[in-house]
Image (cartoon, rainbow, N blue to C red):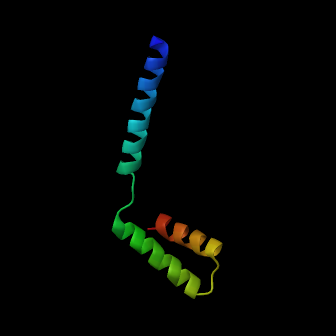
Amino acid sequence: MASSEIIEQKIIKADFFQKLIIRLNKPSLAMKTNFFRLLALAQNAGLGVRDALISIKKSETNK
């Protein structure tokens, strides 16, 4: 019974750290807004979703 409690505690700790990491790496609202603006512009230029995402990724890595 003690080993199951230890396992539960480890799961709780892992869950806490996972949520903390997700929260710390969450993009800001400005970054999200910028992404969707770029996506809309790329699609208005005639690119499909896949091509638009590739274009956005290239533009972010070439700054």
| Residue lying at 39% horizontally and 51% vertically, measured from the top left | 25
| Residue lying at 59% horizontally and 69% vertically, measured from the top left | 54
- Compared to 31, does 40 lie above or below? below
Residue 2, image x, y percentages:
45, 12
Image-based side of 54 in relation to 13, left or right: right
Q: Quadrant of residue 48?
A: bottom right
- Compared to 9, does 3 lie above or below? above
Residue 8, image x, y percentages:
45, 25
| Residue lying at 48% horizontally and 12% vertically, measured from the top left | 1
- Compared to 49, does 28 lie above or below? above
Q: Residue furthest front?
A: 1
User: How many numbered markers are drawn?
Assistant: 0
Residue 4, image x, y percentages:
49, 18
Seen from the viewer's position, the closer of residues 10 and 27 is 10
* On-image quarter of the C terminus: bottom left
| Residue lying at 41% horizontally and 31% vertically, measured from the top left | 12
